Image (cartoon, grey):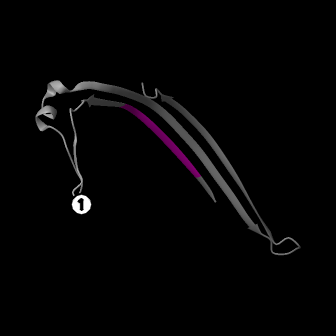
Amino acid sequence: TSAVQFVKATTNSLDSTVALGTNVPYIDVALNGSSPPHLGVDSDFTGNPANYYWGFTQDHQDQNYARELAWRADIDHTFADGLVQGGRAGVRLTNRYADNIDTGYN
């Protein structure tokens, strides 16, 4: 028996994470016994866009390419007579290539 397999894979991506920041004047914490805990902040303060600042930006890019070619061949042979009743053999070959370009997070 014999089999051949070819695989090709690529990725091209841009990930940009942006976060805003704010410093609220207070946070209310209510631990009401059997009720679930409740956190609260001043909704007038958090509703005002002027109370926020640009926290950070992280960008990440990658461009990857890979391919693989694999081949398998097996033989199984039996003999009618003799001390040796049969034999099995196989061959496996693989050719791989990968190129990974990754900027990491800035």
Q: Residue at x 62, y 49 (%)?
A: 71
Q: Residue at x 22, y 33 (%)?
A: 24
Which range is magenta? 4-14
Rendering quarter of residue 15: top left
Callout 1 amino acid:
Gly
Residue corresponding to mark 1: 33
- Relative horizontal placement of residue 26, taking residue 1 as reference (left or right): left
Q: Residue at x 14, y 37 (%)?
A: 42
The answer to whether residue 12 is magenta is: yes
Q: Position of residue 5 (x, y in %)?
A: 55, 49
Q: Residue furthest bottom?
A: 81
* Quadrant of image for the C terminus: top left
The answer to whether residue 7 is magenta is: yes
Q: Position of residue 70 (x, y in %)?
A: 60, 47
Q: Residue furthest left?
A: 44
Rendering quarter of residue 40: top left
Q: Position of residue 91 (x, y in %)?
A: 70, 52
Look at the picture and state if 61 lies above or below 92. above
Label 1: few (<14), some (14–19) or many (≥20) C-alpha neighbours in 10 Å: few
Could you tell me what secondary structure mostly forms the magenta stretch? Answer: strand
Q: Residue at x 79, y 69 (%)?
A: 86
**Residue closer to the observer: 19 or 104:** 19
SS state under label 1: loop
* Quadrant of image for the N terminus: bottom right
Look at the picture and state if 43 lies above or below 57. below
